[in-house]
Amino acid sequence: MLSKTALLSSLIAAGASAQQVGTLTTETHPKLPIQQCTAAGSCTTLNTAVTMDANWRWLHTTTGSNNCYNGNEWDTTLCPDGATCAANCALDGADYPGTYGVTVSGNAMTLKFVTNGAYSKNIGSRLYLMASDSTYQMFKLLNKEFTFDVDVSGLPCGLNGALYLVEMDEDGGLSRFPTNKAGAKYGTGYCDTQCPHDIKFINGEANVDGWTPSSNDANAGAGKYGSCCHEMDIWEANSISAAYTPHVCSVDGQTRCEGTDCGDGDERYSGVCDKDGCDFNSYRMGDTSFYGPGATVDTKSKFTVVTQFVTSDGTDTGSLSEIRRIYVQGGTVIQNSVSKIAGITESNSITDDFCNEQKTTFGDTNSFEKLGGLAAMGGAIGRGMVLALSVWDDHAVNMLWLDSTYPTDADATKPGIARGTCATTSGVPTDIEASQGNSQVIYSNIKIGALNSTFSS
Ligand SMILES: *[C@@H]1O[C@H](CO)[C@@H](O)[C@H](O)[C@H]1NC(C)=O
């Protein structure tokens, strides 16, 4: 993703995230089972569940209910520095439907965009799949496929329902950082290739040093540190546009950054992670009738998304050589669209050759190749990654990089500029939070398994 801002519940009685554990609300992870399938086509159920990211949680004193963080600012008495704050403050349990608009039924999870709770107005959410009450489910998908159903019919321009993998610690950093007492159970340890600075606790310390409240987000701010790691965006989409995008880093595992390493602003291409990634967005690749309402993949109703992680030698330990995409809708298997851009070999999947041709033709900086390309992505996929499921709006660039003309002042007829049919004026968070609050995404029927084992026509 080009940019990402975590959006938090703005609470009278809430901020979010800390590293002790609060007990005012019991944490009960909603169950979200998935299926694991073999080449022969038989599937078994994994008894997985989800947890809310720590950044969205109420962060209060360990001894009571005073906020450690409120709106987009820290309480400077409780949190004069990162270590003191981690000792003074506790992350509490989550009321998933009431506070965050997250509901689960069978194998389906619905994420609402705006939820007006008793104490708060919550914007968006980010959840992780759990294998147990205290560990994330680790996905090792080399030579395997990941399949899910999605209903994006309730996601207009400016919103992004994202399902993706990040190389977080299995325990959320609990064992590596002893001052983190909350761990995966409370959704700690997030990282991605944007090296986000809005993460309230990184490496067991509050990110209070240099914290600057956002100028246009009532719930978020940015601290001195960022949290970086490899990211595989299996799905970033709304009803208008969709992309899948590997992003890599020169560091393995969750890594705290500061300064140039975070790759902020003018130093975008000097950081440890590849913020642009190598995206396949059908519209951007020249097929403007493939995805959308009434299109070949019709976003007015649910469909299945299959992503295959092919290795060069066809084994689970081989080097990642290709990321394939297949859709299934109404019983029909739909192969991904073929790129129709002069200068780019006609293909419908992501390979290093595709990425290199695309970067050259679009005139984009190729930090994906510089930081290791698909082999580096395969390294993280082989070690194991955590599944994140989210819905978000974009306080930096209004999601125009996904669904509109971007940069907005560039010639839309130039290859790579047009990404979808949304207006360049769309996606402004204050607009859509007010007018599109009822938006939602539904993820369901998650399956992993051998190639071609999780779907049929
Ligand atoms: C999966 O199916 C495709 C299309 O039918 C085929 O080309 C490919 O070889 C299959 N892969 C495996 C590992 O069976």
Image (spheres, rainbow, N blue to C red):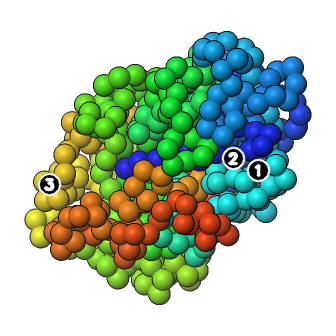
Sequence-wise, the earlier of marks 3 and 1 is 1
- Residue at 54% across, 36% down: 213
The residue at which mark 2 appears reads as 9
Question: Can you give x and y, in whole percent of width and height, for residue 193 in the image?
Answer: 41, 38
The residue at which mark 3 appears reads as 363
Question: Can you give x and y, in whole percent of width and height, for residue 414 in the image?
Answer: 16, 69
Question: Can you give x and y, in whole percent of width and height, for residue 121 in the image?
Answer: 72, 54
> Based on the displayed image, in which of its 4 quarters is residue 426 positioned?
bottom left
Mark 2 and mark 1 in contact? Answer it, CB < 8 Å. yes
Q: Residues within 10 Å of mark 2 (few under 14, many from 20)?
A: many
The residue at which mark 1 appears reads as 120
Q: Residues within 10 Å of mark 3 (few under 14, many from 20)?
A: few
Please name the amino acid that badge 1 sits on: Ser
Secondary element at tag 1: strand
Q: Looking at the picture, does residue 414 appear above or below residue 227?
A: below
Secondary element at tag 3: loop
- Residue at 25% across, 36% down: 266
